[in-house]
Image (spheres, rainbow, N blue to C red):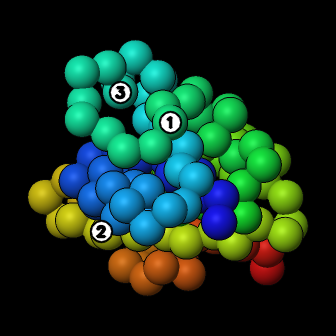
Amino acid sequence: MRFGIIGAGSIGSIISKKLVKNGHNVKIADARGIEHLEGKELAGTPVRVEDVIKNIEVLIISLPIKAMPSIRNIIDQVGEEVIIVDTSNYYPFRDDKLLETTKLKKSRTGWLKVFGFQSD
């Protein structure tokens, strides 16, 4: 299968290594820019975030919740046939400021709605 991964931290990197080891085609991107991938030990092909969504069957998003708004325009361009998997987690020490500004409950549906990834 053809995978795209946005996020090259602990989770994204481990997923990419396991997918490549099992024979899958993997592209991996950092939402902050391709230069953030330099020097990292990665499996798969490092690409720009704009390119990670091209010619894939599955998109894995592995970002901090607070980074989700930065990829909204990219997600809007993903084909309807692409399966999107979100491995993001809410961490109070990192994401509470975001909660305060959005005044949302700590539910996945709430997060997705605020970032426009789910229609009402």
Q: Name the image quarter holding the N terminus.
A: bottom right
Please name the residue that numbered disc 1 is placed on: 45
Asked if residue 22 is positioned above or below residue 43 in the image, the reply reads below
Amino acid type of the residue that numbered disc 2 sits on in the rendered structure = Tyr
Q: Is residue 112 left or right of residue 6?
A: right
Closer to the camera: disc 3 or disc 1? Answer: 1
Q: Secondary structure at mark 3?
A: helix
Q: Which residue is found at the position 85% from the left and 58% from the top?
A: 79
The residue lying furthest to the right in this view is 80
Q: Which residue is found at the position 28% from the left and 59% from the top?
A: 14
Closer to the camera: disc 2 or disc 1? Answer: 1
Please name the residue that numbered disc 3 is placed on: 37
Q: CA distance from mark 2 to mark 1?
A: 28 Å
In the image shown, does 89 or 46 lie closer to the viewer?
Answer: 46
Amino acid type of the residue that numbered disc 3 sits on in the rendered structure = Leu
Count neighbours of disc 1 (C-alpha within 10 A) and say few if under 14, some if 14 to 19, many if 20 or more: some
Q: CA distance from mark 3 to mark 1?
A: 10 Å
Q: Earlier in the sequence, mark 3 or mark 1?
A: 3
In the image shown, does 116 or 14 lie closer to the viewer?
Answer: 14
Please name the residue that numbered disc 2 is placed on: 90
Count neighbours of disc 2 (C-alpha within 10 A) and say few if under 14, some if 14 to 19, many if 20 or more: some
In the image shown, does 30 or 44 lie closer to the viewer?
Answer: 44
Q: Is residue 79 left or right of residue 83?
A: right
Asked if residue 68 is positioned above or below residue 37 in the image, the reply reads below
Q: Secondary structure at mark 2?
A: loop
Q: Which residue is found at the position 43% from the left and 67% from the top?
A: 22
Q: CA distance from mark 2 to mark 3?
A: 23 Å
Amino acid type of the residue that numbered disc 1 sits on in the rendered structure = Thr
Percent x, y of residue 5: 51, 52
Asked if residue 111 is positioned above or below residue 44 in the image, the reply reads below
